[in-house]
Image (cartoon, rainbow, N blue to C red):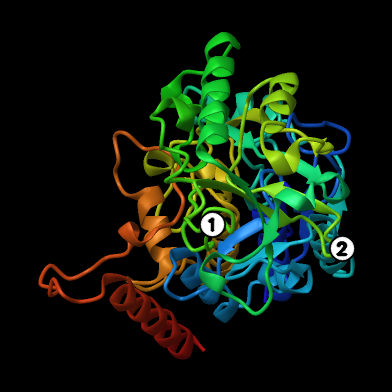
Amino acid sequence: MSKQPRIRVIGAGLSGCEASLQLASMGFEVDLYEMRPNIPTPAHRTSNMAELVCSNSFKGLGLNSAHGLMKNELRLLGSFLMQAAEVARVPAGESLSVDREQFSKEVERLIHSNPKITVHLQEVLSLAGDDRPTIVAAGPLCSSALADDMFSRLGQSRMHFFDAIAPVVDAESIDMNHAFWKNRWDKGTDPDFLNCPLNRATYEEFVRKLIEADAVEPKPFESRELFEGCLPVEEMARRGQDTLRFGPMRPVGLGEDPDTGRKWWAVIQLRAENSQRTLFNMVGFQTRLKWGSQKEIFSIVPALRNANFVRLGAMHRNTFIESPKLLDVHLRLKQNGSENGLPPTWFAGQITGAEGYTEAVATGLYAALNLANTLRRGAGIELPQGSCIRALVDHLTAPNPSFQPMNFNFGLLPRPADLPRKTDRKEFLGEQAQTAIRSWIANSR
């Protein structure tokens, strides 16, 4: 039996770490490359592996949510990062949120304790000149040198969109006289969200200030370059007076104002960043406004009048490839061969256009399974139709002349044309997804 080749994984983010751990568990020797801390990025704050940049939430857990279904699928498939997320979990109602530092430490523990994984803290400058089978999981913030080399070899212009980060506030600086603990619709056992209400006059002033600031501050992007799943709050404010009230500031399921007996006009929810609840993330409040403007505008909120922000919002440019033209259904680069000097190459993570944390983990796991199966059996694997990861991969690889990054959602799951109208669509698709993946796992053993 010939010796298995060493595998090169570029990037120690969510997808790269998941791929490395999966490959090591299957007996492969892995060289994992990470450019930080030697080469910083505009968004990362630490040199930790699997650092969560934009938020500390992996989104919903319930099987009636798209992300809950995908996380369940990842658990069934043995995802290592889903296990790490459970270790670092902090209370957040029906969503999976984690202590960022603890999560990274747990992932690093898994990586460093595995004798088959060798970590190299160095920048990879080119995909060529190395014959090791490779998974590119460099993330949307990959180095300029690697991005330039990659797009040049793939014969494409660099593609990107702009993404935003939400502020984080020191818990001790929140005015608890103007905040209350409550989960929306009282879901969960204990209150996990701290709510900062605004009356109508305060809300309208808040929206006006956001629009005014957005109108005068320079923008390094065009509106079409923003990611719709993570719009800055100032962009949402410009879309209409009540857009925020029906979005991240919706007051539904949070009871009534005791002074008026009426439903709150608008509410900003804060979610714990760490297990000690010393830091809180402003849920859905991604922004690219200047830091001075952020402090001024957020101080309009009664509970945040004297808030100390340990991190303010920021915007960064995310790079992605045109996956439908470049990747096959196994996430393998179609253009392998001597003509471009590349080794067998797979892509995973947000650089593929799979936007979101759970999606990054899923593509890392899927790319690893395909690489391993190709080396051992000469062909990749395909997960079953109806499963979540298969639906996401189909979106990434099916012909699409206007391809853009996207989060996984119910709209990607296939459904029969004759599905009765009265059928609960989410329930049907959820049962279909679970049945499909469980059957595939049972038959693949």
Q: Who is closer to the viewer here, 275 or 330?
A: 275
Cα distance between the residues tagged 1 and 2: 28 Å
Inspect this view and state whether residue 340 appears.
no
Disc 2 designates what residue? Answer: 276
Residue 109: x %, y % from top left: 87, 66
Inspect this view and state whether residue 288 appears.
yes
Residue visible at 71% across and 69% down in the picture: 91
Residue 11: x %, y % from top left: 72, 46
Residue 36: x %, y % from top left: 83, 39
**Callout 1 secondary element:** helix
Could you say which quadrant of the image residue 79 lies in?
A: bottom right
Pointer 2 local density, CA inside 10 Å: few below 14, some 14–19, many at least 20: few
Could you say which quadrant of the image residue 419 lies in?
A: bottom left
Residue 445: x %, y % from top left: 52, 89
* Side of 8 where 74 appears, left or right: left
Q: Who is closer to the viewer here, 152 or 265?
A: 265
Residue visible at 77% across and 55% down in the picture: 273
Disc 1 designates what residue? Answer: 359
* Side of 360 where 23 appears, left or right: right
Q: Is residue 151 above or below residue 131?
A: above
Quarter of the image containing the N terminus?
bottom right
The three-letter amino acid code for the residue at tag 2 is Gln
Q: Who is closer to the viewer here, 101 or 205?
A: 205
Q: How many marks?
A: 2
